Amino acid sequence: MPTISSLNSTSGLTPPAASQTANPSQTLNQADFLKLLVTQMTSQDPLSPTSDTQMAAQMAQFSALQSSQNTENDIQGLRANSLIGQTVSVASTGSPQTGVVSSVQMQTGSAPQIMVNGQAYSLSQLSAIFPTLSTPATTTPAASN
């Protein structure tokens, strides 16, 4: 009687645990939505096209998606800007890096990046935020007469 491992090796079947699963963090973006819309329009039946109300609903969904993406980008920008001057730890290749956020790089169409120790990092690489200790300003005593 064959065992499960021999069945897998001879039949080419793999157990469910080894099968590839979809990444739950993947979401549809604007380009994906447009591809779906174009595919739907090109493959629809010409004798029964999409109704005006369905088209309006899809355009409203598209506008809501675009607005949502713009809001998300704005929030990421605000979060990144609030980190300027903060001490952070970021995950990088090798060992984690710790330093003060010196600036933020904002580029159209992409997520903001924080600059730590002269290196750019995405907000997804941020692993910790520490209170930045400031050194008290030294004052010179006034000359007494």
Image (cartoon, rainbow, N blue to C red):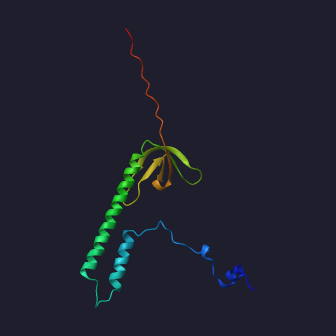
Q: Quadrant of residue 66?
A: bottom left
Is 85 rendered above or below residue 11?
above
**Residue at the extreme right:** 1
How many numbered badges does the structure rendering display? Answer: 0
Please give the name of the residue rendered at 24% of the width and 80% of the height, measured from the top-left corner.
Answer: 52
Q: Quadrant of residue 37?
A: bottom left
**Residue at the extreme left:** 52
- Is residue 86 visible from the viewing direction of this image? yes
Please give the name of the residue rendered at 42% of the width and 20% of the height, measured from the top-left corner.
Answer: 140
Q: Is residue 81 left or right of residue 125?
A: left
Rendered location of residue 69, percent (x, y): 36, 62
- Is residue 106 visible from the viewing direction of this image? no
Please give the name of the residue rendered at 41% of the width and 70% of the height, measured from the top-left corner.
Answer: 28
Q: Nearer the viewer, residue 75 or 102?
A: 75
Q: Is residue 38 left or right of residue 86?
A: left
**Residue at the extreme bottom:** 47
Rendered location of residue 68, percent (x, y): 34, 63
Please give the name of the residue rendered at 25% of the width and 78% of the height, measured from the top-left corner.
Answer: 53
Rendered location of residue 108, percent (x, y): 36, 58
- Quarter containing the N terminus: bottom right
Rendered location of residue 99, percent (x, y): 51, 43
